[in-house]
Image: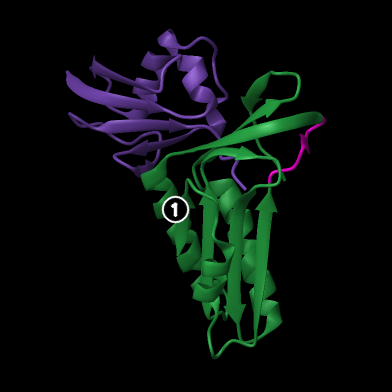
Chain colours: A green, B purple
Amino acid sequence: MFCLSDKKIDDQQLKQQTLDPSAGGFVCFEGWVRDNNQGKDVQKLAYESYPILAVKEGNKIIAETYEKFDIKKAYCTHRVGLLEIGDMAVWVGVSAAHRDAAYKASRFILDEVKSRVPIWKNETWTDGESGWVEQES
Amino acid sequence: MIHLEILFFGKLKEIWNTKKLTMQTTSSNIEELYTELLTKASEVPHKASIKVAINDEFVDWNSQLKDNDSIAFLPPASGG
């Protein structure tokens, strides 16, 4: 399941949802707000989304993940709104019988979410200026 | 004439200086509508990178418009 959250991501609850008795492991990725980007010192950022379409597209990605990889459960939550340095911006978790599928599936979810889900990052830099971040790797 | 709601997101809000507008138009598809909207834009965006949606579904640029459709113009995603 894919969700947007305008509050701090509850990673412990997400982990509990991802656990599965038939899984032999769990891979998690947390994306955090860092204090620098593309050569600029970042003070804070805001994520804007197109909520209905973001949730639809995010859940399409999760459905594709279940088709492509031999996994048990997959969850992804992305923050929206104002975030400070160190805040968790995105959480991806996948449980699977074996590690290879869990690693690959978590990477797939994050890559697809970054490129396809309509969410946009607006950074405020320490010089007081702000701007939309175009694309990142 | 048809009546449309237009939504802009991210950087495109700044180019059109609004996040939402309503308009009457004779444009019959997204491509024509976009050309019409360019007259209101402060700069010409990189069209190839823009995605479009009608009524909360991604669509192609040649998609037909209907009365009361909600059209969204989306710059490249930058989440994560």
Q: Which residue is mark 1?
A: A57
* Bounds of the magenta segment: A33-39
Identify the residue at image location x=46%, y=51%: A4
Q: How many marks?
A: 1
Give the answer, above or below, for where A85 lies relative to A1: above
Q: Residue furthest bottom?
A: A22
Report whether B24 appears left or right of A50: left
**Per the image, is A36 magenta?**
yes
Badge 1: residue crowd in 10 Å (few <14, some 14–19, many ≥20): many
Task: Look at label 1 and name its amino acid.
Answer: Glu
Picture quadrant of residue A91: bottom right
How would you classify the magenta stretch by its main secondary structure? loop
Identify the residue at image location x=51%, y=18%: B14
Image location of residue A68, percent across then percent down: 55, 73
Q: Chain of mark 1?
A: A
Picture quadrant of residue A122: top right
Image location of residue A26, percent across then percent down: 64, 77
Report whether B55 appears left or right of B51: left
Q: Residue furthest right?
A: A39
Give the answer, above or below, for where B42 lies relative to B54: above
Give the answer, above or below, for where A106 lies relative to A40: below
Image location of residue A58, percent across then percent down: 47, 55
Q: Nearer the viewer, residue A52 or A128?
A: A128
SS at badge 1:
helix
Image location of residue A114, percent across then percent down: 60, 49
Picture quadrant of residue A106: bottom right
Q: Quadrant of the N terminus of chain A?
A: bottom left
**Per the image, is A78 magenta?**
no
Identify the residue at image location x=28%, y=20%: B27
Q: Nearer the viewer, residue A118 or A40?
A: A40
Identify the residue at image location x=46%, y=29%: B9
